[in-house]
């Protein structure tokens, strides 16, 4: 297995912040914001767990300047468009390899089986904000691609609750599916394209 890229200070800070808020109670409460309902996703020729806008926060700083046409930006996450029939789901897991030079790896996990429960979970509406109090903890959401029999794919939107945290339905549906394949990818080979002004990078984009 190829060695992964060395962890950047920026990525370590993000993971540290997430861990603190998950493990320590009493994170600051903030009101939920006003989120626009997600549009139908754009269908692309194939999925890519190394699309730089999906994993940029985990990349080393020195790898962010040279364009790489093999890994273009993924389209914005959206709802399953009408007429698109996925055959598999691919989740892009970014994990810290603490025992391997403190690097990161990206694992493309392919799920197969009856996707009906997953599609039902993805079709759930986003909750209204309703002026609820929300914790400030950072949620790192693994990108999820749906892939049809021809290899075409969409970047799927996770339905969110009133605090803009992902609902459990998608995770539960994935857990009930069969893992058909799991492939670890090499972060160090990714050279992201310049960030589009209209599509800023965020650690998670449900």
Image (spheres, helix red, strand yellow):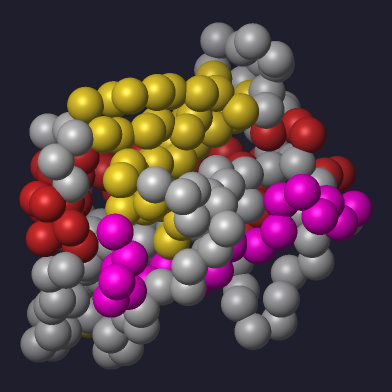
Left or right of 101, for residue 19: left
For the C terminus, give its image quadrant: bottom left
Q: Residue 171, image x and y in percent?
A: 19, 44
The overriding secondary structure of the stretch rendered in magenta is loop
Quarter of the picture containing the N terminus is top right
- Name the foreground residue: 108 vs 22: 108
> Residue 12, image x and y in percent?
57, 39
Pick out the residue farthest to the front: 150
View extreme (right): residue? 66
Q: Out of 2 and 42, give the one closest to the viewer.
A: 42
Residue at 12% x, 33% y: name it.
176
Q: Residue at x 49, y 48 (%)?
A: 151
Q: Going 9% across and 50% down the picture, which residue do you hit?
A: 117
Residue 160 magenta: no
Which sits in the foreground, 179 or 186? 179
**Which residue is rendered at x = 68% and y = 23% of the image?**
4
Q: What are the residue bounds of the magenta stretch?
A: 66-85
Report whether 72 appears left or right of 204: right
Q: Using the image, determine if residue 191 lies above or below residue 197.
A: above
Task: Report the number of discs.
Answer: 0
Q: Position of residue 196 (x, y in %)?
A: 71, 76
């Amino acid at each position: 297995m190829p060695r992964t890229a060395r962890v950047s200070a920026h990525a370590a800070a993000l993971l540290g912040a997430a861990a603190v808020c998950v493990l320590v109670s009493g994170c600051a409460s903030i009101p939920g914001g006003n989120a626009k309902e997600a549009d139908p996703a754009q269908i692309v020729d194939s999925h890519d767990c190394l699309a730089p806008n999906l994993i940029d926060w985990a990349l080393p700083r020195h790898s962010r300047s040279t364009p790489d046409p093999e890994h273009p930006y993924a389209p914005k996450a959206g709802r399953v468009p009408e007429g698109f029939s996925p055959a598999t789901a691919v989740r892009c897991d970014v994990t810290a390899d603490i025992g391997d030079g403190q690097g990161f790896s990206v694992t493309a996990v392919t799920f197969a089986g009856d996707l009906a429960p997953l599609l039902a979970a993805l079709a759930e509406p986003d909750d209204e904000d309703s002026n609820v109090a929300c914790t400030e903890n950072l949620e790192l959401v693994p990108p999820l691609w749906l892939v049809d029999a021809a290899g075409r794919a969409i970047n799927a939107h996770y339905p969110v609750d009133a605090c803009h945290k992902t609902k459990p339905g998608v995770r539960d549906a994935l857990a009930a599916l069969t893992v058909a394949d799991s492939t670890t990818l090499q972060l160090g080979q990714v050279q992201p394209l310049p960030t589009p002004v209209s599509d800023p990078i965020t650690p998670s984009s449900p």
